[in-house]
Amino acid sequence: MIYDWLHNITGSAIAAAIIQSLLPLFIFILPFALFAVLLERKVSGHMQDRLGPMRVGYHGILQTIADIIKLIQKEDIVAAENDRRFFDLSPILVFAGSYAAFAAIPFSGAFIGSNIDLGIVYIVAVTGLVVAGILMGGWASNNKYSLLGAMRAAAQIISYEIPTLLIVVTVIMITGTMNLFTISEWQTQYFWNWLILGGPVFGTAKILLIPLMVISFLIIFLSTLAEVNRTPFDIPEAESELVSGYHTEYSGMKFAMFFLAEYANMFAVSAIVATLFFGGFQSPIGYLGNVFGVKWLIPIEQFFWFTAKGLFFVFVQMWLRWTLPRFRVDQLMAFCWKYLIPFAFVILILVGLITVLL
């Protein structure tokens, strides 16, 4: 029915393209966001010696579905002093930046939105829309707390993109490609070929790369944690200081879009970390499809391993949220500029020397 409606308006080719572009949203991102919200409630509950949601469905599994239905039905409130055009555009822009990143993420050897050669650069560039959307929402809200949260978010995201990019360039020097699918294939199956363990190289180079890659993983994981505004880097949304930061004035579906974008970002950065350092969609122990001669099973196994790795890092993000206290603003910026960036720069130089000499 949706295809017929789009076909009548735009034509068959455009209708097919729109439907294809929406599939990841309804097949993966939206179900993942609903699952991740429930998972975070359960993780936080058990870490605080309680149960979390228990009443809606078995052990509360339908609680997030009830919440999203409630948000959809809520009134869309726009204050008289808000800048209506930018206020409405902000959540769309934030979600678009998060959603577009999934186009270049390889979920398996057979399931990738766009196998472009500049995949990692595209993701870093398109997620820049999130910064513009956050600034737009904070300014258009005409609320000093929202504006302060938006300014904090912009400063934080832009700062922590520097060590992220330095580590990405380091990985590019080792693998010789910016294509995320090729990086996953380069690491091949079996965990000892993953980049966190030096990749499929041998001898002195591997021994020297292993400690550098472990430190690189820690740097990029902490940097991406800051870029998605998760504790202990949640200064832009500090409830004790700024109510809810840049989305204080939002309600209903617009607030839900910010929420959806945050959880989509959590998986996106986890997927990037898994692809760069943990083999991407590669299995750590080989494929059952090869053992039994069932080739069509291999892409399914790859999808399972990729999703499992991504969900593991999402769980670690949730774990850290309920374990660590929030940084102060000066501590947050000092951690980036005094520690992460210098360490990332030194690693970049050392890896460059190793790749040239060995």
Image (spheres, rainbow, N blue to C red):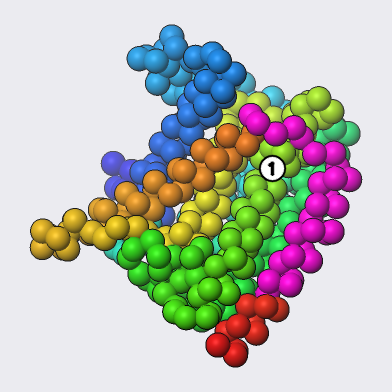
Quadrant of the image containing the N terminus? top left
Q: Tell me where residue 53 appears, x and y as whole percent.
A: 49, 15
User: Front-most of 65 and 269?
Assistant: 269
In magenta stretch: residue 343: yes
* Residue drawn at x 53%, y 80% as measured from the top left: 205
Q: Tell me where residue 245 appears, x and y as whole percent.
A: 77, 34
Q: Tell me where residue 191 appears, x and y as whole percent.
A: 38, 61
Residue 136, compared with residue 112, is above or below; it is above
- Quarter residue 105 falls in: bottom left
Total number of numbered discs in the rendering: 1
Residue 357, compared with residue 85, is above or below; it is below
Residue at disc 1, secondary structure: loop
Amino acid type for the residue under numbered disc 1: Asn
Instruction: Quickly name the residue at label 1.
Output: 229
* Residue drawn at x 63%, y 78% as measured from the top left: 351
- Residue 48 lies left or right of residue 346; in this view the side is left
Q: Dot 1 surroundings within 10 Å: few (below 14), some, or many (20 or more)? A: many
- Residue 129 lies left or right of residue 36; in this view the side is right
* Residue drawn at x 79%, y 66% as measured from the top left: 342
- Residue 277 lies left or right of residue 26; in this view the side is right
Q: What secondary structure is the magenta-colored segment mainly? A: helix
In magenta stretch: residue 45: no
* Residue drawn at x 63%, y 29% as measured from the top left: 322
Residue 26, compared with residue 339, is above or below; it is above
- Residue 332 lies left or right of residue 307; in this view the side is right
Q: Tell me where residue 112 appears, x and y as whole percent.
A: 37, 62
Q: Is residue 274 visible?
A: yes
Residue 239, compared with residue 107, is above or below; it is above
Q: Is residue 103 visible?
A: no
Quadrant of the image containing the C terminus? bottom right
Q: Which residues are magenta?
A: 322-348
User: Front-most of 165 and 256?
Assistant: 165
